[in-house]
Amino acid sequence: MALDDLPETDRPRERLYFNGPTALADAELLALQLGSGMRGKDAVEVAREMLAAYGSLAGVAGREVSELARRPGVGRAKAARLAAAFELTRRL
């Protein structure tokens, strides 16, 4: 199911806007950074698969960009976006 098919109150971006970032699960936060999914899987599903494969957000953050890029539904552009977000966090 595409995120656009969900009621607005169930979409990660809208939930963050109305309830704040602490209201979102790790998969939803990761999905917002991904921006989109792939054919047959929305961004939240892709994010859940990444979390299952790597164990946690820290596990995802600890991966090389090239490894993230090989994940189905990620690719080079999304992997770069994730790596930049994790690096910004490290620099705080």
Image (cartoon, helix red, strand yellow):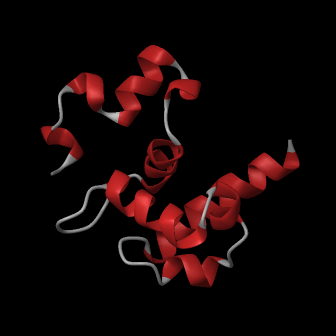
7 relative position to 76: left or right = left
Q: Which quadrant of the figure has residue 36?
A: bottom left
Question: Of 26 and 15, which appears nearest the observer?
Answer: 26
Question: Of 4 and 48, which appears nearest the observer?
Answer: 48
Q: Name the residue located 44 percent from the left edge and 43 percent from the top edge.
A: 28
Q: Position of residue 15 (x, y in %)?
A: 39, 24
Relative height, residue 92 to residue 36 (above, below): above
Q: How many marks?
A: 0
62 relative position to 1: left or right = right
Question: Of 10 and 13, which appears nearest the observer?
Answer: 10
Relative height, residue 23 to residue 88 (above, below): above
Q: Name the residue located 15 percent from the left edge and 51 percent from the top edge.
A: 1
Q: Name the residue located 42 percent from the left edge and 58 percent from the top edge.
A: 48
Relative height, residue 68 to residue 80 (above, below): below
Regarding residue 36, the answer to whether it shows in the image is no
Q: Position of residue 33 (x, y in %)?
A: 50, 50
Q: Position of residue 17 (x, y in %)?
A: 45, 21
Q: Which quadrant of the figure has residue 66?
A: bottom right
Instruction: Pick out the residue farthest to the top.
Output: 18
Relative height, residue 20 to residue 69 (above, below): above
Q: Position of residue 92 (x, y in %)?
A: 86, 41
Q: Which quadrant of the figure has residue 67?
A: bottom right
Regarding residue 74, the answer to whether it shows in the image is yes
Q: Name the residue located 86 percent from the left edge and 49 percent from the top edge.
A: 91
